[in-house]
Image: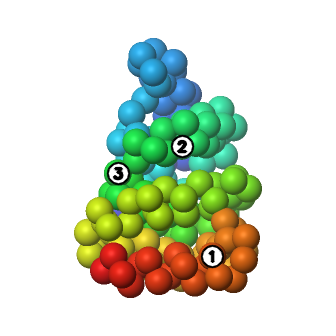
């Protein structure tokens, strides 16, 4: 690995292009494109600071989350875990992610379950369990991981 990292100027041009692409696409970019974009930032350990990109990503996640496949959900929570110390999570993201997980838990592969559980273990509890209105809700999510496994 060469450890070459793009500079902020290139990241901003890339984010501008992504926002432009979203505007051009009928119905916006696909869930796969959203996940790939976020995963790329996580792989580079770069937290996007481009307001338009972040706003677009969060808005699309909330509107598309019912279309997110287990792979999409797993990759998303992995990236949030990798970047959590540099990322301010959307206050409703945790609730949305957990609701999406609960509705699709039995469709997850063993790898997707493992990745998601690893990610949740790396997040601070107030981020990982932000959706949990109670301790029993957190236990329900963990129990669902084990049952789906």
Secondary structure beneath dot 2 equals helix
Residue ID at (54%, 79%): 140
Relative to the observer, which residue lies in front, 43 or 96? 96
Residue 95: where, in percent of width, then height? 63, 59
In this rendering, the count of numbered labels is 3
Q: Which residue is mark 3?
A: 69
Residue ID at (58%, 42%): 62
| Disc 3 to disc 1, C-alpha distance | 22 Å
Q: Which mark is residue 61?
A: 2
| Disc 2 to disc 3, C-alpha distance | 12 Å
Residue ID at (69%, 83%): 135
Q: Which mark is residue 137?
A: 1
Which badge, 2 or 3, comes first in the chain's sequence? 2
Secondary structure beneath dot 3 equals loop
Q: Around disc 3, counting alpha carbons within 10 Å, would you say few (fewer than 14), some (14 to 19), or many (20 or more)?
A: some
Q: Is residue 119 above or below residue 53?
A: below
Q: Is residue 79 above or below residue 136?
A: above
Quarter assignment of residue 103: bottom left
Depth-wise, is mark 2 or mark 1 nearer the camera? 1
| Disc 2 to disc 1, C-alpha distance | 22 Å
Relative to the observer, which residue lies in front, 114 or 13? 114
Residue 79: where, in percent of width, then height? 49, 62
Q: Is residue 43 visible in this depiction of the protein? A: no
Which badge, 3 or 1, comes first in the chain's sequence? 3
Secondary structure beneath dot 1 equals helix
């Amino acid at each position: 690995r060469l450890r070459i990292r793009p500079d902020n100027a290139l990241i901003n041009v890339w984010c501008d292009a992504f926002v432009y692409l979203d505007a051009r696409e009928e119905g916006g970019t696909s869930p796969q494109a959203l996940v790939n974009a976020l995963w790329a930032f996580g792989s580079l350990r770069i937290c996007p600071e481009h307001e338009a990109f972040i706003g677009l990503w969060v808005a699309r996640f909330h509107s598309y989350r019912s279309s997110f496949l287990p792979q999409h959900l797993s990759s998303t929570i992995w990236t949030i875990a990798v970047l959590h110390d540099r990322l301010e999570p959307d206050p409703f993201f945790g609730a949305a992610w957990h609701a999406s997980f609960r509705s699709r838990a039995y469709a997850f592969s063993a790898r997707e379950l493992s990745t998601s559980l690893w990610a949740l273990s790396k997040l601070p509890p107030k981020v990982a369990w932000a959706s949990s209105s109670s301790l029993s809700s957190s236990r329900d999510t963990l129990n669902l991981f084990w049952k789906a496994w």
